[in-house]
Image (cartoon, helix red, strand yellow):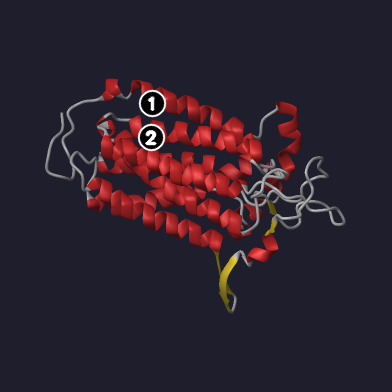
Amino acid sequence: MFASAAGIAPAVAGPVATAGHVRFADLGLHPDVFSIGAFTLRWYSLAYIAGIVVGWWYLLKLLAQPGAPMARRHADDLVFYATLGIILGGRIGYVLFYAPRMLLEPLSVFRLWDGGMSFHGGVIGTSLGLIWFARVHKLDWLRIHDYVACAVPFGLFFGRLANFVNGELWGKPSDVPWAIVFDRTVPVGMAEPARHPSQLYEAGLEGIALFALLAFFFWRTRARYNPGMLVGIFLAGYGVARFTVEFFREPDQQLREFAAATGLHMGQWLCVPMIAGGAFLIATAKARRRRVEPIAGTQSVA
């Protein structure tokens, strides 16, 4: 879902004064929730669990409305397919998009506890999982995507908060009043600059704002009866939000040369097809509309 810490930033020009800025170390945050013997529960893991559980709960609320593309019994099975897609897609995507060097040490790919998940890879994995699920149950895969898309921002919100608690994926140096001085962002001996808390920007845009946008279209319009409309809004909305926030975020350490050479971060390049695909789904959704006979609920909808 989310790439892990970017590593130590290079020497940077720009604001370095930290007077008046909050130091991350003073917030008392720690990546671990608690440890019992050899077992350690991390906020990053808890974010995944919370995103899946809360997303599943909200999905059931959506399915209770007229014209739903599947029933409660389907939603329970869907969690397995979606979770499998998130984990496999997110990890494989991270390796391919952000850390191909890991292929030289194949066993490192399986060390999920070390962090390193790609949201874009997770989207691909989840989408394939949903298509597989729909095929098994003979359901409309695109309408299922519409409903699931409305629940995804919960996971994005919790995931970005976990990134913040971990003190990773910090932003570029800045002197804005809310900038935060993160630890170990520059080589030892250099002054730590205050930085944009880009994790919180993403939590707000990809989580809260995107959820509100999708909720409006689901509950206040008839968008859910136009197959592809809601998932198109999700793809385009996430793409624009992530593309924008990347301007305030440090690129991953191993991809700084790529960003300098192309003018954009890897995350931004990966958002371009999302935005284009989302725009296409939105533009063509009305043409796909047809009479909807519900799997759940009590009404058919023209």
Say whether disc 2 or disc 1 marks the residue closer to the N-terminus.
2
Query: Can you name the residue that lies furthest to the right here?
Result: 189
Q: Position of residue 59 (x, y in %)?
A: 31, 49
Residue 264 visible: yes
Q: Which mark is residue 281?
A: 1
Q: Label 2: which residue?
A: 231
Q: Which of the 4 quarters of the picture holds residue 126?
A: top left
Q: Is residue 132 above or below residue 84?
A: above
Check disc 1 and give the amino acid type: Leu
Q: Position of residue 276 (x, y in %)?
A: 48, 24
Q: Residue at x 34, y 30 (%)?
A: 229
Looking at the image, residue 125 sits to the left or right of residue 285; the answer is right
Q: Secondary structure at mark 2?
A: helix
Q: Secondary structure at mark 1?
A: helix
Q: Which of the 4 quarters of the picture holds residue 66?
A: top left
Classify 10 Å Cα crowding around label 2: few (below 14), some (14-19), many (20 and above): many
Classify 10 Å Cα crowding around label 1: few (below 14), some (14-19), many (20 and above): many
Q: Which mark is residue 146?
A: none
Looking at the image, residue 169 sits to the left or right of residue 210; the answer is right
- Alpha-carbon span between mark 2 and mark 1: 8 Å
Check disc 2 and give the amino acid type: Val
Q: Position of residue 289 (x, y in %)?
A: 24, 25
Are the residues at dot 2 and dot 1 in contact (C-beta closer than 8 Å)? Answer: yes
Residue 77 visible: no
